[in-house]
Image (cartoon, rainbow, N blue to C red):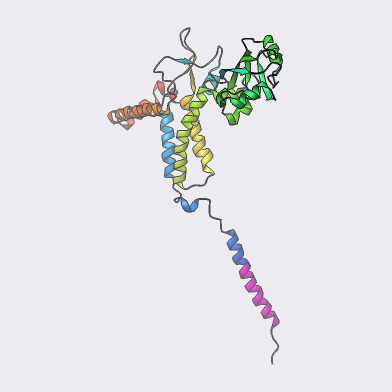
Amino acid sequence: MPPKDTNKGKADKDTSGSKKNGNKKKDSEVPQEVFLAKFRPKQRSVFYMVYLGICAGTLLFYDTCDVRKKKQDCGHPGISPFECRTTACFLKGGGDMDTKKVTITRKKGIKFGLASGSQKGDRDVFIKELKEGAITAHNAQADPEDRIYPRDTIVSIDGATGSSLVKKLKATDTEKAVIEFKRSRLPSYLRWLHRSSKPNMLEKLLTAPGTQNWFKSFYKLGGLGFTMWYLSGYSAMSLPLYYFGTSGFVAWNVNRCCHDSKVNPGVAHCYKGGSANLTVAMNRIKQKAESQLKVFQKQGPRNYLKGWFWSNDFSKWL
């Protein structure tokens, strides 16, 4: 009998093994299914183009500096045009605090029970921590709105302020005390940002009316952008920049302040124009777009574009 070819068997094993390894490599090289891909349509860029057109139309046809009523001053003396247009509307009115009064009842000899976090030179008392005492006993029985919490600031006790306020805090000879205190307007989950009797820059930014209006505008535009992103079928990597980033910029432009150095004395240089209501802004955009369409139909494409680019008012769109 002829001897068995052992090399042939090894070759067959190697070949089969290489095929298996090759299949494994190919399987590993196949990209995994994208998250939510089976629930979303195929990639279509038309949805982003539609969204981008809406945002571009908002920037083009909405005049942020259009004033229908009296100008609202949102600056300060000597404010620069750059500061006015970028941050003024998002800081004006920020940091305002709610003021409340409560009556504390206690037995004589009982302390209020708080640790002060006030800094040197402060007239008010910032509550750093509550301890066992009259205030904690009051909080146990009072409604949530009438309670005194850490990070509140005591303004007066029985009308006493300043240096007299500190003496009133230490005194224990009265059974009733009327405490007036201030509370930050930050949401409860962000109140840890309030760390002294005076609001900081971040707190002013988050509580300013302009910032609140920006959030409302961004919520609506961002919601539209999220819908368009979902329908487009593209990955989540495009969502922060192309959709939310664009929404944030357009919302900022709708709610920002304007600067005019050529005004009469007593008239605000830095002022709030347009409308903080996005719905009203969209109605104005619609009216302006309709008027521009009528002009386009009347003049024709050539004359319309010529008047657009060579007009002295073209700089206001930039």
**230 or 293, nearer to the observer:** 230
Q: Residue at x 42, y 28 (%)?
A: 278
Residue 243 location (% of width, % of height): 49, 38
Would residue 115 be counted in the magenta stretch?
no
Q: Which residues are magenta?
A: 5-20
**137 or 219, nearer to the observer:** 137
Q: Residue at x 41, y 21 (%)?
A: 313
Locate residue 229 relative to residue 136 in the image: left or right: left
Q: Is residue 61 visible?
A: no
By secondary structure, the bulk of the magenta-drawn segment is best described as helix
Q: Residue at x 29, y 29 (%)?
A: 294
Would residue 18 be counted in the magenta stretch?
yes
Residue 183 location (% of width, % of height): 59, 21
Q: Residue 68, located in which quarter of the rendered image?
A: top left
**121 or 111, nearer to the observer:** 111
Quarter of the figure with the N terminus: bottom right
Residue 305 location (% of width, % of height): 36, 29
Q: Residue at x 47, y 51 (%)?
A: 39
